[in-house]
Amino acid sequence: EAQVTQNPRYLITVTGKKLTVTCSQNMNHEYMSWYRQDPGLGLRQIYYSMNVEVTDKGDVPEGYKVSRKEKRNFPLILESPSPNQTSLYFCASSLLAGGEQYFGPGTRLTVT
Amino acid sequence: GESVGLHLPTLSVQEGDNSIINCAYSNSASDYFIWYKQESGKGPQFIIDIRSNMDKRQGQRVTVLLNKTVKHLSLQIAATQPGDSAVYFCAEKWTDSWGKLQFGAGTQVVVTP
């Protein structure tokens, strides 16, 4: 089944404790992206990747890192999480940039 | 910067009626627009897209209209069903930005029996 998977689905952590949210797609898509979703603000793009080893900042990249060493994986790294990073995070992929994106199920992160 | 917005945060529609969800965008350089549907507890799901060289595009029970003159995008859902209850987002891609998408805040559609 073609899908985008994220892990974990739920995470509660403390300020400053490094964490990684994994994202994987099995559709051989070149483009992948991370978004955060907050009430009243819609989806805001954090980082995106046009292909392996090619990443770029979205609208809200501060406090986040990403890597794209393999085509299928695009992990989101929070080196030192803060409470303002409490949010619902979505990973998405598409065959090419600017095309139909497939979204993962989301990761609910709470930073205390 | 310029952003995508929606006119109505909540739309209540009677089952069987047609729904119209509106979206205003301010960047005249946008060349691609997408509508997504997000059901409670799920990730957004692609509905339909349209490129800036088109005025209208139809899918199954959905139609997207693009009015570049007034920078307005709309999604029409025919014969709205209970399963159409969700949050609907429009998103735009700027011409010079292959990777970045700008999403609106979303409209909650509630289908009543």
Image: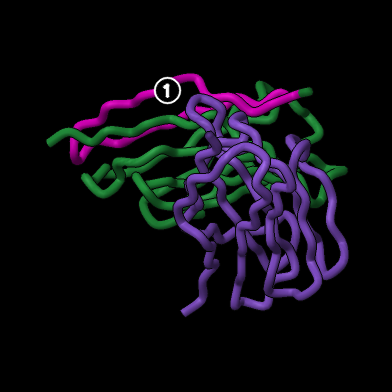
- Most common secondary structure along the magenta stretch: strand
Which quarter of the image is occupied by the C terminus of chain B?
top left
Q: Nearer the viewer, residue A12 or B100?
A: A12
Residue B19 x %, y %: 34, 34
The chain drawn in purple is A
x and y percent of residue B24 in the render? Answer: 60, 24
Q: Does the magenta run of residues contain B52?
A: no
Residue at the location (46% across, 56% down)? A9
Give the SS element for disc 1: loop
Residue numbers of the magenta segment: B2-26
Q: In this picture, is B93 found above or below A39?
A: below
Counting from the top left corner in percent of width and height, residue B58 is at 48, 51
For the N terminus of chain B, which image quadrant?
top right
Rendering coords of residue B54 (x, y %)? 66, 45
Compared to A105, does B27 lie above or below? Answer: above
Q: Is residue B73 above or below residue B37?
A: above
Residue at figure coordinates x 49%, y 19% from the top left: B7
User: Which is nearer the eye, A96 or A22?
Assistant: A22
Instruction: Confirm whether the magenta stretch covers residue B3.
Output: yes
Amino acid type of the residue that numbered disc 1 sits on in the rendered structure: Pro
At a point 64% along the width and 34% down the height, the residue shown is A82
Left or right: B42, with A7 as reference point: left
Q: For the residue carrying disc 1, how many other residues have a C-alpha within 10 Å: few (<14), some (14-19), or many (20+)?
A: some
**Residue shown at 40% from the left, 38% from the top:** B87
Camera sees residue A39: yes
Tell whether A111 sits left or right of B107: right
**Nearer-the-camera pick, A77 or A40:** A77
Instruction: Tell me the shade of chain B.
Output: green
Quarter of the rendering containing residue A92: bottom right
Q: Which residue is mark 1?
A: B9
